[in-house]
Image: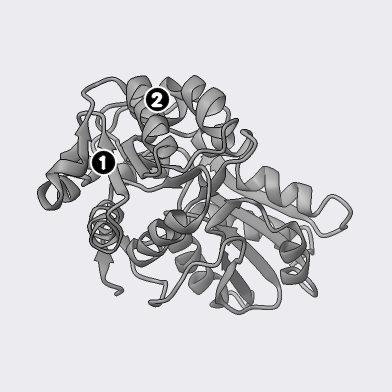
Amino acid sequence: MSKTQSQRVAYGEELVELGRQNPNVVALEADLGKSTMSNLFQQAFPERYFEMGIAEQNMLSTAAGLALSGKIAFASTFAVFASGRAYDQIRQTICIGKLNVKICGSSSGLSDFGDGSTHQAIEDVAIMSAIPNMTVLTPCDAEETRQAVCAAAKIPGPVYIRVVRNNLPDYIPEGELEIGKMRVLREGADLVLFAHGSMVDVSMKAAEELEKKNVSVKVVSVSTMKPFNYEGVLQLVQGAKAVITAEEHSYLGGLASQIALALRQSSIPMDYVAVEDCFGQSAHSAQELMEHYGLTKEHIIQKADALRNESIL
């Protein structure tokens, strides 16, 4: 069993490390520092930490001003508030101005299981990807989150980093995140599973089960949702019989949509595992929601079995 770690803790720890390396790194928070773990930066550099209260629009506007003064501004809050409540400030000021603001959308997807639909961001990747000049990163574990934070600091412009609330197993080795590059975590010849975030682990487990059914599965982690590597997708599916995408996000404007665009001139069959066009709800655990919305290894296997029944796999 792989070791599991918190993406949120990894974010906070790497932010502190960046702060040590660069005095121009500042952090802003919207009253959720203990949850997003930006409070680690507050403890290390209180003079560079700005607690804005429950005022996400003000936080992002202030981050824009700090960026204009030469700072690298990291602003954190729940993903649903980052992408929704402060959309106007992100679009009109940060992205049109190409300002050096990095936004961490924490507790994304269905991972904030107890607070229900108002706190569950299942459309944030779609929203952020649709804004020109924005880079969108969706790391799959703690190490890749650290790499995403480092990569974001080096990018001259707006970046959105998406992390979940629950711990995730380790898959990515230490190193650097190359923007746009997809990582092949498992080789296979029959089926290609493209996944991002928490669904990378689910896809790896599904691939193990499908291997027992004599289905050879390649698992690809997509940590850069924008700019999206359409050409890379075509290279990775060469020789494969089918493609399935997996994401803790709506299929609309997410990975399913991007892979479909990449394959628009291809004849390879494709299916997806994602949240349908609906909101989330409260539950006793994140796993309960993953099962309810069809985001499990069993659902991926069902999709693969359907392709087998159609004599595709």
For discs 1 and 2, the disc positioned in front in the rendered view:
2
The residue labelled by disc 1 is 285
Q: Is residue 175 left or right of residue 303?
A: left
Residue occupying image coordinates x 25% and y 62%? 17
- Front-most of 124 and 91? 91
Residue 19: quarter of image? bottom left
Q: How many marks?
A: 2
Q: Secondary structure at mark 1?
A: loop
Q: Residue at x 60, y 66 (%)?
A: 182
Query: Can residue 210 be seen in the rendering of this structure?
Result: yes
Q: Quadrant of the N terminus?
A: bottom left
Residue 59, how many percent across, how many down? 32, 27
Which of these two is toward me, 199 or 29? 29
Measured from the top left, where is residue 194 in percent x and y? 60, 60
Question: Which corner quadrant of the image does residue 171 belong to?
Answer: bottom left
Check the image and report above or below for 92 versus 3. above
239, above or below 75, in the image: below
Q: Which mark is residue 58?
A: none
Which mark sits nearer the N-terminus, 1 or 2?
Answer: 2
Q: Amino acid at mark 1?
A: Ser
| Residue at image point 70% right, 52% down | 259
> Does the image show residue 281?
no
Q: Secondary structure at mark 2?
A: helix
Q: Amino acid at mark 2?
A: Ser
- Label 2 belongs to which residue? 61
What is the x, y in percent for residue 226? 61, 49
Within-10-Å neighbours for mark 1: few <14, some 14–19, many 20+: some
